[in-house]
Amino acid sequence: MGDIGCDGASADGGPPRGVDGNLPLEPDAFVGRAAELDELSRALTASRLVTVTGPGGVGKSRLAARAAARCAPRDGVWRVELAALGDTEFVDHVVVEALGLTDHTTRLPRETLLDHLTERRLLLVLDGFEHLVDACAELVADLLRRAPGLRVLAVGRRALSVAGERLVPLAPLGEDEAVRLLAVRAGQHAVGAGDERQMRELCRRLDGIPLAIELAAGRLGALSPGQVLERLGDRFRLLTGGSRDALPRHRTLRTAIGWSHELCTSEERLLWARLSVFAGHFDLEAAEYVCGGNGLAAGDVLDVLSALLAQSVAIREETPAGARYRMLDTLRAYGAEWLEGVGDAERLARRHRDWYVGLATWCELDWFSPRQREIAARVEADLPNLRRALEVGLTDPDEAHLGQHLAGSLWFSWVGCGRLAEGRHWLEQAVRIDSGHQQPRLKALWVLAYVAILQGDTVPALAALQECRRQAVRAANPTALAYAEHRAGCLALITDDVPRAEALLRSALQRYGEIGELNSNVLMARIELAMARVFQEDLSDAVRMCEDVRRVCEEHGERWARTYALYVLAYAAWCEDDLARARELLADSLDGAHGFSDLLGSVLALELLALVTVAEGKAAEAAVLQGAADRMWPSVGLRLFGSAHYNTPHELCEARAREQLGDERYEESVRLGARLGRDEAVRRALRGIGAAVGDPPPGGSVRQAA
């Protein structure tokens, strides 16, 4: 498919411009490395797989980010952060997530990746893969073989050893560049670097390793360069027996880290070690809870963390979820070794798990509130830590109920935010465990069934519901029984057993009322019952129920369930030939569902919007929307659940569009829609594009034409 190409600097001579994708430009001043940057850019143009290798702290990630920002592939540059991932089983999941893909089916993540990448030209940056090298090598080889427009930039301490790989080893900085880096970083700490001779000696002592230099710069506010040299020299002699020339570069970095660690106060060392329990980013509240106590008061964590920030041990970053912190992987690994050495690793892992169990519990309760978007962003930001908490929770036999509770409490993320496949993985682990605690396992069962239903996997869904109901009856657990009946009703609805669906949903709603349950799930039961009434042509009852749901949603600030209520109201409006109202409701529904990455809600709205569009006399545009929906369905599951009722809008729209356009032009318009990405398709649908040139004039209602 030709070169992706690296365009280099912008035409005006400024820094490289960003490209579409998820890769941010480096926020820090980029010092030196001009020759290495040019070499890496040339390699990316010439080879489909380039791996930047080198010791920890040498600046691989910064160089890779800078080189990637020079590239301008048609479909963007996408970065996958792997350093915080501990389980090889999730490598494919993390790449899917980094690419912003949503797949509700039971397909393996690899299939989703291949489906997405086959026709695209993009650069995938895999950063921090060395502890997952076998899984990453297998993935990269498969993707490169089957996606001809893909290129990969891997960043790690070793090669992937995949055929065609081009290695770009990164050496430490030359002396002049090292001195410049020291001066720049010292300036960022608002201190002068001091005497140039001492600066050069310090950089030589640190072998030009950027991370070691930055740690030293963080000390220049309290120590002069001469004092830093003296203390660093003592540390080198201690570790090498006075043989300075024999010091390997990786030993230099470890020495510099250890020296910086020794210069920390006892509280700073304690926090450094305890922060290593986090995977990726964390916020202040989490740090205070997990790391506070036993020698470090929770109220002192902020001050101690600020000291670590000043010393470049920790980094503060602004994210969609607010201000968050992280440690470079090399420094985190050093802290983890120290934590293990003092015998405190297991206790901190439990505290970490407890915090994220509590966070998920709070997020589940707060999901039914105006803060849904905030909750969605919070869970996305904390996903690496939630995964770690699930691993700990589901592998500790004595406290497995906490892992079950966590897997079930995250239902809103699995279902409402496009993570069905990952949720299925954790929930299946959870229900296999006999924890001796009934309630969390029952919840995991009905959530598992919910996920499987949305994936179109009805047999395991039914099995989970039957077990949940049986155990709930035996234990006289009214909550689990209500949820089991609700999800059984949902299953009956999408399999066209509408009378049974109505009976089960009414029973579930009665049970919800008896126990005083009101949340997004309860509202969804009302919406599903309304859909059953629509399918039985009782529009007035359906509208009454969904208007009531809409009112409750607006009172509580609930946005996710509201999108489905709007869909049912739009369906009823179309049935009554009120096309303007149907379009308005569907635009609102589609915008809300897409904002939550709810692929099912999005594609249902798109299908119905196509029907409204053809009824407005815009047959070609309706066919385009159908083509866009056709492309989305494989990531949802069986198209329109295989349901005759849900399929009615699609069939009516297709019949009318074919009648007006003819088969050839209809198929051409569908193919055009199938080339649209999800974001582009949603934008097009929400714009409400006018009638395409050559569309026949309106000619009666769709219902009459069908």
Image: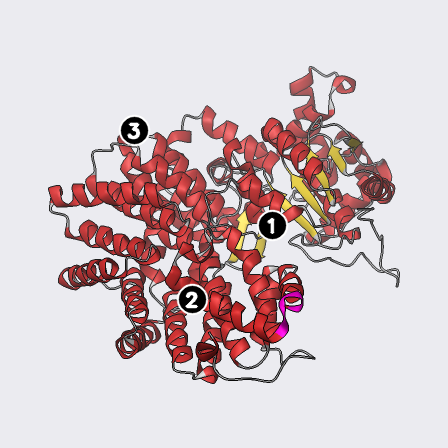
Name the residue beneath numbered marker 2.
648
Q: Residue 264: x percent and y percent?
A: 55, 37
> Where does the magenta region start and end?
661-665
Residue that numbered label 3 is attached to: 397
Left or right: 631 with respect to 34? left
Position above or below: 300 against 369: above
Q: Secondary structure at mark 3?
A: helix
Disc 1 residue type? Leu
Residue type indicated by callout 2: Thr
Q: Which mark is residue 99?
A: 1
| 10 Å crowding of disc 1: few (<14), some (14-19), many (20+) | some
Main structural element of the magenta stretch: helix, strand or loop? helix
Answer few, some or many: residues within 10 Å of disc 2's Cα (few below 14, many 20 plus, some between 14 and 19): some
Q: Nearer the viewer, mark 1 or mark 2?
A: 2
Q: Is residue 643 visible?
A: yes
Please, what secondary structure does the residue beneath circle 2 have? Answer: helix
- The earlier-in-sequence mark between 3 and 1 is 1
Q: Is residue 586 rendered magenta in the image?
A: no
The answer for how far apart the CA atoms under marks 1 and 2 are is 33 Å
Going by the numbered disc 3, the residue's amino acid type is Pro
Q: Is residue 406 visible?
A: no
N-terminal of the two: label 2 or label 3? Answer: 3
Dot 3, how many residues are within 10 Å of its Cα: few (below 14), some (14-19), or many (20+)? Answer: few
Figure label count: 3
How far across and how far down the image is residue 417, in percent?
45, 56
Instruction: Give the percent coordinates (x, y) of residue 545.
Output: 27, 74
Comparing labels 2 and 3, the label whose residue is closer to the camera: 2
